[in-house]
């Protein structure tokens, strides 16, 4: 049977999902191998040095730099609070003394008799990494973090914004073809991962922010709506650091596109279950897909996903990612072994895709992605 290899999105009811939870710098791991963890649980932490605030004491006390060490009321290595007196001049005949106060809270790190400056190091900044999903610690990476594993349902999206979040799944739309408007977002969606159908409007996203939803998942979005939501044009290199108070995952693409039925049905079947969502997207080298991960409850009878490892073969489910059939999901019906001449006059390896209505179209293999599951 003819086979090929192509990149793909995973939409699967069951997979052994592993998430590496690593600190940016060396620190302390707070869990052990085999521990059960919750998505909000801190699994590793470290402390980064606080910010440095320079302060010219000589200027404030109208003295020479060499006099500064003797005029300080707090010495190198001592803790100080913001607005606390840290230096006092001798004055004239013991009178008319002037004082200077600390501009920040921290520790006096250095005192210079050459420049008359001191450096105040701020409080250490805690950096904590959460488990991200409910699961089991499969591996501990000493001083760095751990790997959390869980049998999960997994949906990867085309595009997303916002970082990691979690919440129970709530379904706002009745069908994958229904547009997601603001009137579908309810106060009870606070803290939830709200699943829509087709295009989500900017008004709906704003409403989701107002009610405090954790995330919104829908089939499509207009580029103009995205720009209006963010207030700027988004680059294509990487997303995930947007601070808008909401994570958004788009499963199909830009424009009036319905969510794939199997994706909608999978998410709808998990209504009420806790989903971990990450909108981070990287399109260039080191591709990163936005994702919705739903750890399965004990006793879930979902069939384990077949590992396809990017193998495209007859019968594989694919999504066309170029016009004129952009966003359409179909089945690979034929994989001709020889390159064929395209309408542009160039040669390329192609495949024949059977569409949901029974029609068949010929498209370059580079114009499809595999829907794994």
Image (tube, grey):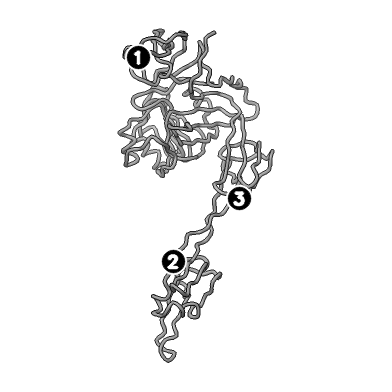
Whole-Å distance between the Cαs marked 3 and 1? Answer: 54 Å
- Rendering coords of residue 108 (x, y %): 51, 69
Q: Does dot 1 land on a helix, a strand or a loop?
A: loop
Q: Where the C terminus falls, by quadrant?
A: top right
Residue that badge 2 annotates: 54
Residue 63 position (above or below residue 305): below
Q: Does dot 2 land on a helix, a strand or a loop?
A: strand
- Rendering coords of residue 120 (x, y %): 48, 66
Whole-Å distance between the Cαs marked 2 and 1? Answer: 63 Å
Nearer the observer: mark 2 or 1; the answer is 1
State if disc 2 and disc 3 touch (CB < 8 Å): no
Q: Does dot 3 land on a helix, a strand or a loop?
A: loop
Query: For mark 2, does the 10 Å Cα neighbourhood hold few (<14), some (14 to 19), or many (20 or more) residues?
Result: some
- Rendering coords of residue 117 (x, y %): 44, 71
Residue that badge 1 annotates: 346
- Rendering coords of residue 94 (x, y %): 44, 90
Nearer the observer: mark 3 or 1; the answer is 1
State which tag comes first along the sequence, 2 or 1.
2
Residue that badge 3 annotates: 27
């Amino acid at each position: 049977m003819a086979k090929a290899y192509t990149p793909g999105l995973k939409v699967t009811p069951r997979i052994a999902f592993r998430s590496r939870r690593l600190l940016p710098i060396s620190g302390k791991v707070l869990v052990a191998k085999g521990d059960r963890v919750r998505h909000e649980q801190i699994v590793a932490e470290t402390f980064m040095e606080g910010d440095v605030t320079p302060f010219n004491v000589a200027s404030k006390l109208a003295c020479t730099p060499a006099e500064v060490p003797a005029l300080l009321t707090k010495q190198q290595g001592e803790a100080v609070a913001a607005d606390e007196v840290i230096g006092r001049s001798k004055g004239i005949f013991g009178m008319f003394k002037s004082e200077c106060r600390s501009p920040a809270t921290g520790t006096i790190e250095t005192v210079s008799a050459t420049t008359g400056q001191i450096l105040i190091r701020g409080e250490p900044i805690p950096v904590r990494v959460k488990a991200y999903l409910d699961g089991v610690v499969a591996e501990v990476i000493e001083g760095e973090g751990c790997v959390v594993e869980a049998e999960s349902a997994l949906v990867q999206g085309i595009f997303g914004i916002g970082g990691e979040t979690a919440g129970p799944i709530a379904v706002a739309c009745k069908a994958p073809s229904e547009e997601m408007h603001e009137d579908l977002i309810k106060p009870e969606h606070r803290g939830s991962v709200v699943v829509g159908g087709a295009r989500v409007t900017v008004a709906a996203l704003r409403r989701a922010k107002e009610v405090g939803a954790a995330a919104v998942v829908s089939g499509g979005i207009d580029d103009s709506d995205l720009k209006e939501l963010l207030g700027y044009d988004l680059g294509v290199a990487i997303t995930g650091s947007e601070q808008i108070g909401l994570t958004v995952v788009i499963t199909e693409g830009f424009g009036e596109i319905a969510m794939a039925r199997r994706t909608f049905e999978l998410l709808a079947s998990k209504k009420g279950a806790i989903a971990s969502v990450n909108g981070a997207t990287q399109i260039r080298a080191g591709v990163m897909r936005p994702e919705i991960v739903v750890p399965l409850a004990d006793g879930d009878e979902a069939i384990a996903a077949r590992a396809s490892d990017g193998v495209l073969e007859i019968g594989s489910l694919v999504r066309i990612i170029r016009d004129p059939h952009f966003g359409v999901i179909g089945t690979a019906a034929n994989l001709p072994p020889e390159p064929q001449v395209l309408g542009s006059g160039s040669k390329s390896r192609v495949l024949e895709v059977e569409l949901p209505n029974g029609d068949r179209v010929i498209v370059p293999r580079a114009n499809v992605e595999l829907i794994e599951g």
